[in-house]
Amino acid sequence: MTVPELIFGIMAALNIKSIDFKMLSHLISPFEISETSLRTSLSRMVKKGLLSVEKNKKEAVYYRARKNNRISSNISAPFTSPGKRGWDYDYWGVLYSVPGAEASPRHKIRKKLVAYRYGLWSPGLWIRPVLTGEKPYNGLEELSENPYCRLIRFTPDQKLKRDECSRIWHLEEKVEIMNKAIEKLKNAMSMISDSTPEAAFKFKMEIGESAVRALASDPLLPNEQLPEKWPAEELRELFGRWDNDITKIAEGFYIPILKGESV
């Protein structure tokens, strides 16, 4: 986990909308990160539009930017079972074509599509099922302004079969990723009762990050498109229990900091 990922994770997990440098320094103290590294990471996050910064009594205060909130919403989407949402057999699609010499735009588009759980159906066409209540294109509306992309909604003549879905979304690899996260969480459950508040906070962020990353790989497909024994539901349930239990102990560390009692 990089320093920017840690900062992002802390602000998202604790629902922090703004935080000053001193308070953030106290929150990351269990991770042995230098002040220089923290300042450098914050500066880079501001430049990337993930945070905005203001000076308050000579102290820098950092705010979650709109882009940060959109990313957080996308990451948290797999925390809810897709089985609780409807599907009308339509798909969101992103068609794109980038000239061969322009590798950078192609890489950025592909990276964003993967992050938003789109799968490659055929060359240049990435898709996702349209789930009830989901925003059009799952937060990728900005690609409509990209000259290389076109956004579509369509209904295939024939339903996609499970083996096709496995290929499109690399489901066998995702099963392995999720099963490893489940095993890691099961091992971590035995460590909760012996944890100090500071250690619990560190576990919450480090072990939680691996579980969140595994959950983020869930493409949120309807059950009929998933392989048998799909582990996402078990991972969601186990992560929910673990995070609830570890947070109760970790609160003894981070709540006084957020209240300004330890700063």
Image (spheres, helix red, strand yellow):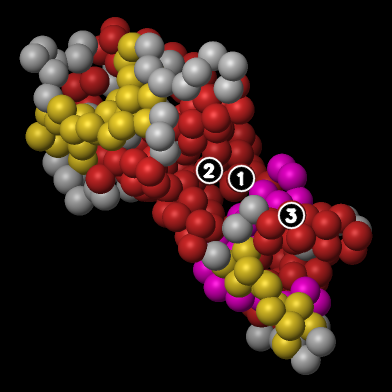
Q: Is 55 located above or below residue 222 in the figure? A: below
| Coordinates of residue 5 in the picture (x, y in percent) | 67, 49
Within the magenta stretch, is there residue 4? yes
How many angstroms separate mark 3 from mark 1 (CA)?
21 Å
- Is there a contact, CB below 8 Å, between mark 2 and mark 1? yes
Q: Could you tell me the amino acid type at mark 3?
A: Arg
Question: Residue at 33% across / 25% down in the picture?
Answer: 95
Q: Which residue is mark 2?
A: 212
Q: Secondary structure at mark 1?
A: helix
Q: What mark, if any, has residue 188 been given in the picture?
A: none
Q: Name the one closer to the observer, 127 or 47.
A: 47
Q: Which residue is mark 3?
A: 44
Q: Secondary structure at mark 3?
A: helix
Question: Residue at 12% across / 24% down in the picture?
Answer: 155
Q: Name the one closer to the observer, 121 or 152.
A: 152
Describe residue 55's horizontal placement relative to residue 234 as left or right: right
Q: Could you tell me the amino acid type at mark 1?
A: Glu
Q: In the picture, residue 136 is in which quadrant?
A: top left
Q: Which residues make up the magenta segment?
A: 1-22
